């Protein structure tokens, strides 16, 4: 699998670095040319840029999986002596790696530019002390895990779409499957969150019951997986576990389809 | 000699269409089998099932005693009828890729073949002509010391000079302990390669046997037998 990871990186790094280069240039321009304007506008534009970076990388990675299923390169990939899980696992690890790289570089660069253009060099140690490190990290991990589960769901939908409509290259079919499955999973998750209203506080790892805590009743009307009060961030324990279990089932399902069901 | 490949009652349906219909076929160790038939006779479908790119609707396929899967993929060297290498690769990358994934890849043989095909390692996959792509693919496939080689239409769509080079390469580099399956409808060019032949029509085998015996029995070349069968 390690070898396949290597070739997955070799095959995708140019586009990812291209996206990174574009976003870094755009960020530099943004901070330099709008320095005299309000910071709130810059922050809004910079956030949009970061979002755009993730979206383009996401679409590129999803598109390259689609190519395996619908284009001639699948003849090489699917005749390698690898299991479906190994191929899929390698692709997810590389996707995770790219998102992590893009995320950490764009966010750090934004902090750097913010410090530089705000006139006074902010002391980074001071800056870091203002932020609760562990909370940010756990929140980032949660987001990455959610992102990866979404990616697995997309891969599963694509593989399933390829199997159910043999030889008919209907492009949007996977998206319909994706929407249906997302709805089902979200519904199950919502039910579970309602049944088990226990949330974990990402700052101090304390567990709270949303039905008892008055804080929750003010902040959230219905049951959701994650939420933040500004001061604290909470994640529903069983809901998050469901998310992970769904991810594992979909991963194994996709691996099985790739290995045993796909007709190229 | 035992059978390296055993195919029993193999069927493949696409909706209502039968691509393969109750097909039985064995391939002996060390033999070259030509699967002959016009376009649409089921050749590529059969090959794809053997390589794990398609699943049978019914029947059994055993390669070296195993169902098609990771093990059989490691002992089968497959030449598809299309450019299957990744577009970002150079020939050098493609070589490294084969070395990494197939422990039976013989680099020395690969480099000799590349030289013979007049291809350079720094060439990009996307810059190759159809004939060059075919030569490169064949170089990679023949450089493996595989138990079974599967060549799907190896000379279709290449010019006569390249065709001769490709046939030469197959003859010179074929390992006599291995088995080989070659599908083609260009029978005249290839018939000297075959130990055995199987004629495929509408997803079923209508004639099979030792090539030399068939020539003797019918008093005709395999090419003539082919024309006789398929012109009906």
Image (tube, coloured by chain):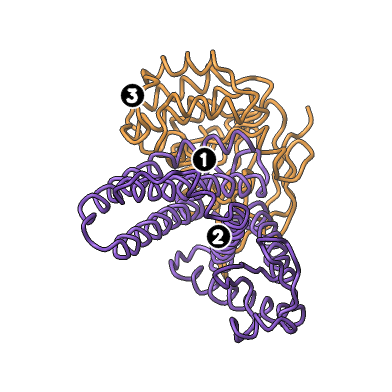
Q: A19 or A220, which lies in front?
A: A220
The verdict on a common chain for dots 1 and 2 is yes
Q: Which residue is mark 3?
A: B161
Numbered badge on residue B4: none
Name the quadrant containing residue A5.
top right
Query: What is the x, y in percent for residue B215?
Result: 57, 31
Quadrant where the N terminus of chain A lies? top right
Rate crowding at label 2 as few (under 14), some (14 to 19) or many (20 or more) other CA atoms within 10 Å: some
Q: Chain of mark 1?
A: A
| Residue drawn at the location 58% of the way across and 47% of the way down | B48
- Whole-angstrom CA distance, mark 3 to mark 1, is 36 Å
Q: Which residue is mark 1?
A: A8
Query: What is the x, y in percent for residue A78?
Result: 58, 45
| Residue drawn at the location 66% of the way across and 57% of the way down | A251
Q: Colour of chain B?
A: orange
Q: A195 or A129, which lies in front?
A: A129
Residue A115 as seen in the image, left or right of residue B63: left
Chain letter, purple: A
The verdict on a common chain for dots 2 and 3 is no
Q: A80 or A126, which lies in front?
A: A126
Q: Chain of mark 2?
A: A
Rate crowding at label 1 as few (under 14), some (14 to 19) or many (20 or more) other CA atoms within 10 Å: some
- Whole-angstrom CA distance, mark 1 to mark 2, is 19 Å
| Element at label 2 | helix
**Residue B178 against residue B37 in the figure, above or below:** above
What number of labels is visible?
Answer: 3
Q: Chain of mark 3?
A: B
| Element at label 3 | helix
Q: Please tell me whether mark 3 or mark 1 is closer to you in this view.
A: 1
């Amino acid at each position: 699998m390690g070898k396949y990871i290597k070739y997955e990186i070799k095959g995708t790094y140019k586009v990812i670095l291209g996206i990174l280069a574009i976003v870094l240039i755009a960020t530099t321009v943004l901070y330099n040319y709008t320095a005299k304007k309000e910071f709130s506008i810059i922050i809004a534009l910079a956030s949009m840029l970061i979002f755009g970076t993730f979206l383009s990388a996401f679409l590129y990675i999803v598109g390259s999986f689609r190519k395996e299923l619908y284009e001639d390169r699948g003849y090489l990939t699917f005749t390698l002596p690898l299991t479906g899980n190994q191929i899929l696992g390698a692709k997810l690890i590389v996707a995770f790696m790219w998102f992590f790289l893009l995320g950490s570089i764009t966010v750090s660069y934004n902090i750097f530019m913010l410090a530089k253009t705000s006139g006074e060099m902010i002391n980074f140690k001071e800056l870091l002390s203002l932020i609760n490190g562990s909370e940010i990290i756990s929140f980032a991990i949660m987001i990455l895990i959610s992102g990866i589960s979404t990616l697995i769901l997309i891969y599963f939908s694509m593989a399933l779409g390829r199997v159910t409509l043999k030889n008919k290259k209907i492009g949007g079919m996977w998206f319909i499957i994706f929407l249906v499955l997302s709805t089902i999973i979200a519904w199950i998750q919502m039910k579970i969150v309602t049944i088990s209203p226990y949330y974990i506080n990402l700052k101090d790892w304390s567990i709270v019951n949303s039905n008892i805590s008055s804080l929750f009743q003010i902040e959230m009307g219905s049951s959701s997986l994650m939420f933040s009060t500004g001061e604290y961030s909470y994640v529903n324990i069983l809901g998050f576990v469901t998310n992970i279990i769904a991810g594992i089932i979909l991963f194994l399902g996709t691996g099985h389809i790739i290995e045993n069901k796909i007709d190229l | 000699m035992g059978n390296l490949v055993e195919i029993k009652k193999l069927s493949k349906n696409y909706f209502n269409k039968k691509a393969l219909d109750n097909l039985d076929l064995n391939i002996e160790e060390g033999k070259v089998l030509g699967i002959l038939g016009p376009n649409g006779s089921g050749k590529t479908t059969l090959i794809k099932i053997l390589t794990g790119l398609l699943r049978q609707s019914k029947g059994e396929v055993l390669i070296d005693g195993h169902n098609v899967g990771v093990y059989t993929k490691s002992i089968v060297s497959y030449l598809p009828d299309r450019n299957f290498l990744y577009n970002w690769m150079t020939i050098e990358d493609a070589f490294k890729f084969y070395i990494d994934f197939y422990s039976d890849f013989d680099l020395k043989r690969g480099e000799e073949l590349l030289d013979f095909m007049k291809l350079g390692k720094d060439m990009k996959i996307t810059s190759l002509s159809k004939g060059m792509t075919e030569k490169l693919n064949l170089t990679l496939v023949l450089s493996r010391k595989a138990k079974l080689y599967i060549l799907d239409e190896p000379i279709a769509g290449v010019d006569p000079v390249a065709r001769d080079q490709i046939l030469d390469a197959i003859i010179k580099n074929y390992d006599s302990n291995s088995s080989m399956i070659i599908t083609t409808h260009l029978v005249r060019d290839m018939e000297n390669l075959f130990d055995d032949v199987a004629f495929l029509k509408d997803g079923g085998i209508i004639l099979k046997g030792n090539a030399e015996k068939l020539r003797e029995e019918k008093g005709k070349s395999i090419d003539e037998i082919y024309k006789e069968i398929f012109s009906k």
